[in-house]
Image: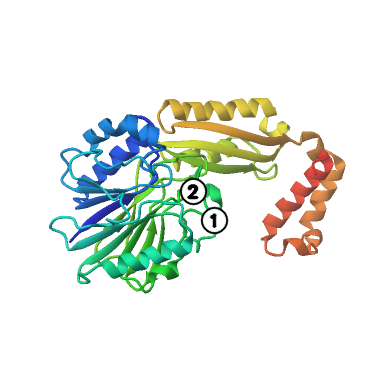
């Protein structure tokens, strides 16, 4: 049973920061899973400058491992792997388009790597066909290592991080259809940061983006992961305990959130479901009645921040920020006009007559109409 661990887009910049710790976690996971091979499909380094600075440190990470490591360059570290450079024992870099194949010792496996180049899709497809036709032993498993855009995905350019050297068609772009008539069992890809993505090319053949194993920018949200491949099986997502961004919305409603206990019960529930290595952004919005909560806007903000700071001091989260969009609507809530509006909501006629809220439940409609009323009374467009 051959096991391969797949990651990409670490964008290393310095030793012992969160990105470096993510690499160390990946190595530890490889040892625990008893893998045969680690593959890194591009952008191991943030740039060629950082690659030069970190090469000697990287050798220590890759030394004395029980598995081999295979790396291809990405668009950020395209020139970081010049011939003769040494990255560690049992580390192979596929950096020559004329020598794209590597056969790990003792494994029934052929690896084909495409070093990143700013190619248009027709040229990428042509090379894929050439590589596929060049493989003589069709009885071995075949894996393609690739770094670039999958055009089948409907995504934003920010899903690829902060990018450079893009052609008008994207970064060495491909489509899933390019691989359907080729013999690659797995296409293990890099360049897509946002999340793990696995798609069937056809039966028992897969295209996989591992996603970045650590949050590189604020766009990569949620617990990060890597890809475990057992040859002949469907790829498996493995979660890491690495640093990551998390963004949560908390909306207050003056009808249901009538005490501080209710508000902070919601906040503690968020914290209880947040990983200890998360950098939390709390977007708190909505309205409240100062008379019922017995705090001002400023006091509520201070209490929220104190709770988050306590959580950080106990190492339950890495850091936090609060986007405070709450408004105290005490004067409006206690206004006679609002009380009349609430009575009409309870009579259901206003709720049932609104054709724009058809997909909502009854309580959701009431909340939406209350918010519209608040916005109108407070002059918010």
Q: Which residue is mark 2?
A: 160
Residue 113 lies in quadrant: bottom left
Tell me: residue 179, above or below residue 197: below
Residue 287 lies in quadrant: top right
In the rendered image, residue 163, in percent from the top left (x then y), is placed at: 50, 44
Q: How is the image coloured?
A: rainbow
- Tell me: 265 left or right of 174: right
| Crowdedness near tag 2: few (<14), some (14–19) or many (≥20) residues, C-alpha within 10 Å | many
- Tell me: 380 left or right of 297: right
- Tell me: 147 left or right of 350: left
| Residue closest to the far left | 106
Q: Are marks 1 and 2 in contact (CB under 8 Å)?
A: yes
Q: Earlier in the sequence, mark 1 or mark 2?
A: 1
- Front one among 237 and 270: 237
Residue drawn at x 24%, y 63% is 231
| Residue closest to the far front | 98
Task: Give the CA distance from mark 1 to mark 2.
Answer: 9 Å
In the rendered image, residue 129, in percent from the top left (x then y), is placed at: 36, 68
Q: Say which mark, if any, is on residue 85.
A: none
Mark 1, secondary structure of its residue: loop
Residue 26 lies in quadrant: top left
In the rendered image, residue 334, in percent from the top left (x then y), is placed at: 81, 38
Q: Which residue is mark 1?
A: 155
- Front one among 68 and 21: 68
Tell me: residue 75, above or below residue 20: below
Tell me: residue 364, above or below residue 87: below
Mark 2, secondary structure of its residue: helix
In the rendered image, residue 120, in percent from the top left (x then y), is placed at: 48, 59
């Amino acid at each position: 049973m051959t096991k391969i661990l797949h990651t990409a887009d670490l964008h290393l910049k310095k030793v012992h920061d969160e990105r470096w710790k993510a690499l160390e976690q990946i190595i530890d996971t490889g040892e625990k899973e008893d893998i045969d091979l680690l593959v890194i499909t591009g952008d191991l380094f943030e740039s060629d400058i950082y690659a030069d600075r970190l090469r000697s440190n990287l050798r220590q990470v890759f030394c004395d491992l029980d598995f081999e490591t295979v790396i291809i360059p990405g668009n950020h570290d395209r020139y970081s792997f010049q011939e003769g450079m040494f990255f560690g024992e049992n580390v192979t870099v596929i950096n020559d388009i004329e020598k794209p194949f590597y056969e790990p010792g003792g494994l029934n496996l052929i690896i084909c790597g495409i070093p990143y180049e700013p190619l248009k899709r027709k040229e990428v497809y042509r090379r894929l066909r050439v590589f596929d036709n060049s493989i003589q032993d069709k009885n071995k498993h075949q894996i393609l290592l690739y770094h670039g855009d999958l055009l089948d995905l409907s995504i934003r350019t920010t899903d690829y991080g902060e990018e450079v050297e893009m052609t008008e068609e994207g970064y060495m772009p491909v489509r899933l259809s390019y691989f359907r008539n080729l013999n690659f069992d797995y296409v293990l890809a890099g360049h897509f940061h946002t999340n793990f993505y696995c798609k069937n090319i056809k039966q028992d053949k897969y295209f996989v983006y591992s996603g970045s194993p650590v949050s590189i920018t604020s766009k990569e949200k949620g617990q990060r992961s890597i890809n475990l491949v057992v040859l002949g099986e469907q790829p498996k997502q493995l979660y890491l305990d690495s640093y990551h961004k998390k963004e949560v919305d908390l909306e207050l409603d003056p009808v249901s959130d009538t005490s501080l206990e209710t508000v902070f019960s919601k906040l503690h529930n968020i914290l209880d479901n947040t990983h200890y290595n998360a950098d939390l952004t709390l977007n708190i919005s909505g309205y409240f009645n100062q008379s019922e909560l017995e705090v001002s806007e400023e006091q509520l903000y201070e209490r929220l921040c104190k709770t988050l700071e306590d959580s950080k001091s106990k190492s339950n989260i890495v850091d936090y920020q609060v986007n405070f969009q709450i408004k105290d609507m005490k004067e409006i809530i206690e206004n006679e006009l609002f009380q009349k509006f609430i009575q009409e909501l309870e009579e259901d006629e206003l709720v049932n007559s609104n054709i724009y809220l058809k997909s909502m439940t009854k309580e959701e409609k009431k909340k939406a109409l209350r918010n519209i009323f608040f916005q109108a009374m407070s002059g918010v467009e």
